[in-house]
Image: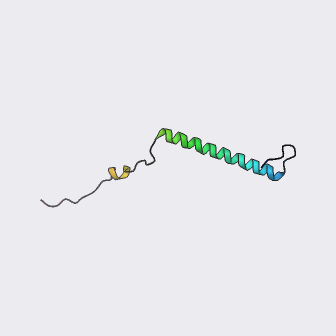
Amino acid sequence: MAEAASGPESPEDDAKRKFREALDRKRNKQADLNARQSARDGGKVHGAHGPAQTRRSFRRKSGG
């Protein structure tokens, strides 16, 4: 699929180009954020046992 190199862009082509550029920027931004996140902490599971370790249990004392 070759595009005509010489010729004015139609408004439809211009809109497609703008959307494609915006999508590329969005993907690059998301990829950059993911790269920073994975560099900071390598695992995917974070704090799996956080609240369970610090949970207090109240037990009634039995007589004795």
Q: How is the image coloured?
A: rainbow
User: Position of 38 compared to 16: left or right?
Assistant: left
Q: Position of residue 55 (x, y in %)?
A: 33, 53
Would residue 56 be found to the left or right of residue 10 on screen? left
Residue 53, percent across and down?
A: 33, 50
Which residue is rendered at x = 37% and y = 52% of the image?
51
Residue positioned most to the right: 7
Quarter where residue 58 is shown:
bottom left
Residue found at the very far left of the displayed protein: 64
The residue under the point 37% across, 49% down is 50
Identity of the residue drawn at 67% across and 44% down: 25
Name the residue at 67% across, 45% down: 24
Q: Nearer the viewer, residue 21 or 1?
A: 1
Nearer to the camera, 8 or 18: 8
Q: The C terminus lies in which quarter of the figure?
A: bottom left
* Quarter of the image where one finds residue 29: top right
Q: Judge left or right: residue 17 versus residue 31.
A: right
Q: How many marks?
A: 0
x then y, percent, for residue 22: 70, 47
Q: Is residue 53 above or below residue 62?
A: above
Location of residue 63 in the rendering, given as x and y in whole percent from the top left corner:
14, 61
